[in-house]
Amino acid sequence: QKRLVESGGGSVQPGESLRLSCTATDTSSVCLAWFRQAPGKEREGVAVINPGGGSSYYTRSVKDRFTISRDTAKNTLYLQMNSLKPDDTAMYFCAASQLFYCTLQTGLKAENYNSWGQGTQVTVSY
């Protein structure tokens, strides 16, 4: 049974950075991803990484600002978020897929994930 627990959220000012972590047991062979959901909006795929720390993909709005990584030995997924903007404000969730390989098209779709963390809040404001 996969278990995912996020940490690292908080409140920051625009331009600052945060690093989210997610302990994710029994997930070494599947894609892992970060999703986010702002109030009144649909859940959005932010970034996905393939098993073994392979290829990764990002939604356009965070590309070049966010970096996803995973440490299989520590069963941990990370999301380094730089140059944060108010539009990045949301609840962030880590998720484990039932897929063993993800592309940009498949990796950012919530329907391809069957295990979710409880979420961690990120707020970006002055």
Image (spheres, rainbow, N blue to C red):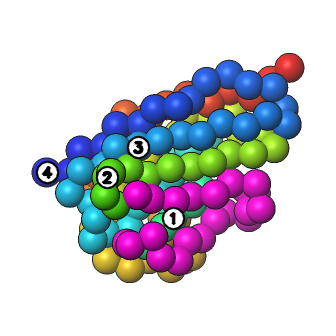
Q: Nearer the viewer, mark 2 or mark 4?
A: 2
Amino acid type at circle 3 is Cys
Few, some or many residues within 10 Å of mark 2 (<14, 14–19, 20+)? some
* Residue 122 drawn above or below residue 33: above
Q: Earlier in the sequence, mark 3 or mark 2?
A: 3
Marking on residue 39: none
Magenta span contains residue 61: yes
* CA gap, disc 3 and disc 2: 8 Å
In contact (CB < 8 Å): disc 2 and disc 4: no
For the residues labelled 3 and 1, say whether their Cβ atoms are less than 8 Å apart.
Answer: no
The crowding category of the residue bearing disc 4, from other C-alpha atoms within 10 Å (few below 14, some 14 to 19, many at least 20), is few
Q: CA distance from mark 4 to mark 3?
A: 16 Å
Q: Earlier in the sequence, mark 1 or mark 2?
A: 1
Q: Earlier in the sequence, mark 4 or mark 1?
A: 4
Locate residue 86, reporting x and y percent.
79, 34
Q: Provide residue 66's location: percent of width, then percent of height.
A: 68, 54
Query: Disc 2 designates what residue?
Result: 75
Q: Residue tagged by mark 3?
A: 22
Per the image, label 1 sits on a secondary structure element best described as strand
Q: Amino acid at mark 1?
A: Val
CA–CA distance in space, label 2 to label 4 = 14 Å
